[in-house]
């Protein structure tokens, strides 16, 4: 990753959310390890032959380049930086993590530890969705560990020792306190949590 006056090159990041802007472009919310949550305009990304179109996928590691000094910057390049296959419940759980990040973190406030926890959680969710992999951390444990790290690093942590997330009973015990703290912080319920409860009851 390099930086020059108002220009950032190849910053590790993830796409959190994208909305259409005008006929051919997107406004994306990206999570960068070194720059936090960024608002970027991806001009022409909806065009059939755009180089950005096949790359801008949620939950996949990216290298992002942009320019600008204002709140909304211009995405100039995006490249794939690996692959994290998700399916089924893991896919919905990853959307839940994205919503938590967007709701709890201030824009352009770097949180490298949360970024690393997010990347690890996506890996764990990918492993959990493949039932043939032995020793994979269960999906619920991966989510609880991410929630724990997010709250701790954002300054809202619980006053209790870090649980052993490989211990199913410890994960169940911490679920309630984590949910209570998140409910205190969020002004309205998470849409993805409601869907997860409807689908899976957890």
Image (cartoon, rainbow, N blue to C red):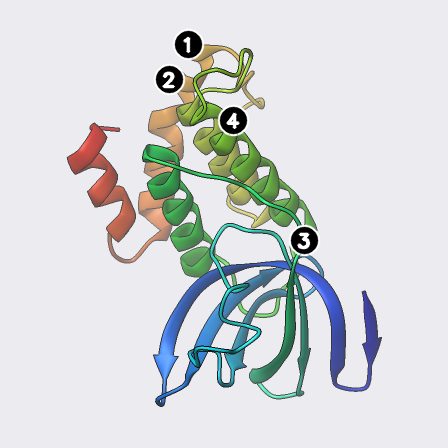
198, above or below 111, in the image: above
- Marks 2 and 4, the one that precedes in the sequence: 4
Residue under the image location 40 percent in, 33 percent down: 178
Question: Element at badge 1?
Answer: helix
140, above or below 46, in the image: above
Q: Is disc 1 in contact with disc 2, using a CB cutoff of under 8 Å? A: yes
Residue 164 point in image, percent of width and height: 56, 16
Residue under the image location 65 percent in, 43 percent down: 116
Q: Is residue 46 left or right of residue 64?
A: left
**Residue 129 can be seen in this image:** yes
Cα distance between the residues tagged 2 and 4: 20 Å
54, above or below 73, in the image: above
Cα distance between the residues tagged 1 and 3: 36 Å
Near mark 2 (Cα within 10 A), the count class, few <14, some 14-19 or many ≥20, is some
Q: Picture quarter containing residue 80?
A: bottom right
Residue 141 point in image, percent of width and height: 46, 23
Residue under the image location 15 percent in, 37 percent down: 198
Q: Which residue is mark 1?
A: 169
Label placed on residue 81: 3
Q: Which residue is mark 2?
A: 172
Cα distance between the residues tagged 3 and 2: 34 Å
Q: Which residue is mark 4?
A: 127
Question: Element at badge 4?
Answer: helix
- Total count of labels: 4
Question: Element at badge 3?
Answer: loop
- Marks 3 and 2, the one that precedes in the sequence: 3
Cα distance between the residues tagged 4 and 3: 18 Å
Looking at the image, is mark 2 or mark 4 nearer the viewer?
4
- Marks 1 and 4, the one that precedes in the sequence: 4
């Amino acid at each position: 990753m390099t930086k020059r006056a108002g220009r950032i090159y190849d910053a590790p990041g993830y796409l959190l959310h994208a909305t259409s802007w005008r006929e051919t472009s997107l406004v994306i919310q990206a999570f960068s390890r070194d720059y936090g949550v960024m608002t970027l305009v991806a001009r022409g990304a909806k065009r059939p032959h755009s180089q950005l179109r096949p790359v801008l996928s949620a939950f996949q590691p990216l290298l992002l380049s942009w320019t600008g000094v204002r709140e909304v910057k211009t995405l100039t390049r995006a490249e794939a930086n690996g692959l994290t296959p998700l399916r089924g419940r893991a896919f919905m759980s990853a959307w839940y993590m994205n919503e938590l990040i967007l709701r709890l973190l201030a824009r352009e406030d770097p949180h490298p530890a949360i970024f690393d926890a997010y990347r690890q959680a996506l890996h764990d969710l990918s492993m959990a969705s493949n039932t043939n992999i032995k020793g994979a951390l269960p999906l619920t444990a991966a989510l609880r560990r991410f929630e724990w790290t997010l709250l701790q690093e954002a300054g809202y942590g619980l006053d209790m020792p870090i649980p052993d997330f490989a211990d199913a009973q410890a994960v169940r015990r911490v679920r309630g306190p984590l949910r209570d703290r998140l409910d205190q912080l969020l002004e309205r319920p998470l849409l993805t949590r409601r869907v997860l409860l409807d689908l899976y009851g957890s």
